[in-house]
Image: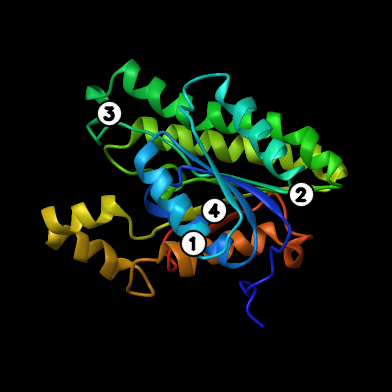
Amino acid sequence: MSYTHPGSLADKVVIVTGTARGVGRGIARTLARNGARLLITDILADELATLRDELAAQGAEVRSVVADLRNSAAAEEIVEAAHRHFGGLHGLVNNAMAIKPPSPFASQTADDFDLAISTGPRATFLLMKAAHPHLVAAGGGSIVNFGSGAGAAGEPGFAAYGAAKESIRGLSRVAALEWGADKIRVNVVLPFARTEGTDFWEKSDPEAFKAVVDAVPLRRIGDSEKDVGALVSFLLGDDSTYITAQSVFVAGGSGVSR
């Protein structure tokens, strides 16, 4: 039986951030198929509503909250909305993050750095804190945060992004150690998957894109639903209750030695 089988997340209430596009949207679709009761959130109101309506039409129990994670109050508002709508919380997926386009280290500004930090590790920190008492009340739960090979291995042009993503991994390890006694698991996923951004990259520089994909041992780019969403579903479910404090590359073998 696949660990992503329908029903594997039945009755579990899960928050997923950054769901309007890309990896977050793929994760939400997979979790919905597997029975999760979803609170999805993003700053892009129209695209978020489109996803909410799509999932609801397929029978999922889903609510949406438009939120700007740069706002310090957003974390509490998101978590309270989930509790209000569903009566509890069992999982949190911190996928959202905003960055400026890549540029050389010396060209990046303090504002570029602040944007990455405020929507990445700072928002992750605040959402985890807001979720903690609700996960304790549920008897435990699972948090899945997101890192990146741009931080784990380093990637030219991504100084602020890489720093922010590695900060998330540090937060996750500490929380996993402290919250294990509460039966709360915290893991990090580092994906390489197709998104609107990779589609643009492929169109704008097909040779460079092909070279990167060809360097992946499995010779393909990941799928946000079948590859990333499947792993997130597993980490949120009851088949992974002895897995915590881990960083898992979903990148076809790239980054494995970092």
Spatial CA distance of label 1 from label 3 is: 45 Å
Q: Residue under circle 1?
A: 57
Of labels 4 and 3, the one closer to you: 4
Instruction: Tell me if mark 4 has few (under 14), some (14-19) or many (20+) residues whose alpha carbon lies within 10 angstroms of its own.
Output: many
Q: Is residue 235 left or right of residue 119?
A: right
Tell me residue 207's x, y (percent): 13, 62
Of labels 4 and 2, the one closer to you: 2
Q: Which residue is depicted at the point 71% across and 45% down? A: 86
Of labels 2 and 1, the one closer to you: 1
Instruction: Tell me if mark 3 has few (under 14), some (14-19) or many (20+) residues whose alpha carbon lies within 10 angstroms of its own.
Output: few
Spatial CA distance of label 2 from label 3 is: 38 Å
Q: Which residue is depicted at the point 63% across and 75% down? A: 5
Mark number, residue 165: none
Whether 86 is drawn above or below 167: the answer is: below
Residue type pointed to by label 1 = Ala
Tell me residue 246's x, y (percent): 65, 53
Whether 4 is drawn above or below 127: the answer is: below
Q: Residue under circle 4?
A: 189
Q: Are marks 4 and 3 in contact (CB under 8 Å)?
A: no
* Residue projecting furthest to the top: 110
* Residue projecting furthest to the front: 57
